Image: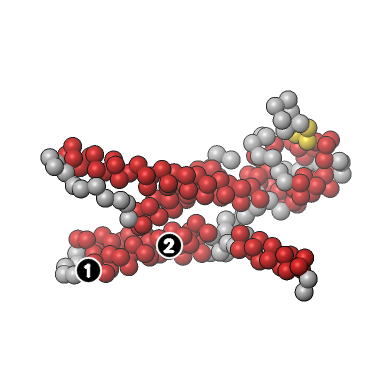
Amino acid sequence: MENTIKVERAILSLTQDELAQKIGVSRQTINSIEANRYTPSTVLALKLSEIFAKPVNEFFKLSTND
Amino acid sequence: MDTKKIIDCERKRFDKIIKFRLPHKFMTVGIAVAALSIAMMFVRAFVMEGETEWLKHLLQKSLLVGMLIMSISRDKHEDEMTMALRAQSYAIAFVVGVIYALVMPYVEFGVSNVVHSGGEEFKDLGDFQVLLFMLMIQLMFYHNLKRYR
């Protein structure tokens, strides 16, 4: 799974810490998601979707090995 | 109460047990209990005299309790990722613990026969040794998984 959370975060001028606080996770979790080391749950993905005001599949994409 | 309600009730109770964690402040309590137990083990071994076997068993139990408290305490920032990492660390500790319990008696037996001619007779590991090893692996892997997340 690939994602463009870093870009979406930059558009809203949010730091990792600020985004983490908004969705109730730690900064390290946001860092791991951005680095594609962790795939978030549907709940977390929907929370991100709400913050970015975009559907989930606009910032999460399946990669070739998924 | 119909069957569906009973199943829902049981599922909720089961969910509660699975998600049970102590508050973060218990981590300090766990560390203190474990550290105190280890310190007392040294005192018993090098300072105290006489029949203290009962104290040895008591300290072994308190060390396990301390480490268990550390193991089930919440993180400062507990979220779904730390929960996933904790589950991973328990799985690793279980597998490594079983391998340790199976292999270690043979290693001890082999080493004691090489070092002393005749050596010790074959004996299985005690519950303390296996549980201590599993808790140590769990805490160590959880810490490392968090570090490299």
Residue lying furthest front: B3
User: Image check: B61 left or right of B11?
Assistant: left
**Looking at the image, can residue B115 be seen?**
yes
Q: Position of residue B96 (x, y in %)?
A: 44, 44
- Of circles 1 and 2, the one toward us is 1
Q: Nearer the viewer, residue A30 or B6?
A: B6
Q: Nearer the viewer, residue B78 or B65?
A: B65
Question: What's the distance in space between the residues labelled 1 and 2, CA to CA?
Answer: 21 Å
Which residue is at 32% across, 68% downward?
B58
Q: Do marks 1 and 2 share a chain?
A: yes
Which residue is at 24% across, 63% downward?
B43
Residue lying furthest top: A64
Q: Position of residue B149 (x, y in %)?
A: 58, 40
Amino acid on which the number 1 mark rests in the picture: Thr
Q: Nearer the viewer, residue B131 or A5?
A: B131
**Looking at the image, can residue A11 be seen?**
no
SS category of the residue bearing label 1 = loop
From the viewer's perspective, is residue A11 above or below residue B40? above
Name the residue beneath numbered marker 1.
B52
| Chain of the residue that carries numbered disc 2 in the rendered image | B
Name the residue beneath numbered marker 2.
B66
Crowding around mark 2 (Cα neighbors within 10 Å: few <14, some 14 to 19, many 20+) is many
From the viewer's perspective, is residue B40 above or below residue B120? below
Q: Position of residue B114 (x, y in %)?
A: 18, 37
| Chain of the residue that carries numbered disc 1 in the rendered image | B
Amino acid on which the number 2 mark rests in the picture: Gly
Which quadrant would residue A14 be assigned to in this image? top right
Crowding around mark 1 (Cα neighbors within 10 Å: few <14, some 14 to 19, many 20+) is few
Image quarter in which the N terminus of chain B is found: bottom right
Which residue is at 44% across, 58% downward?
B67
Residues marked 1 and 2 touching at CB (< 8 Å):
no
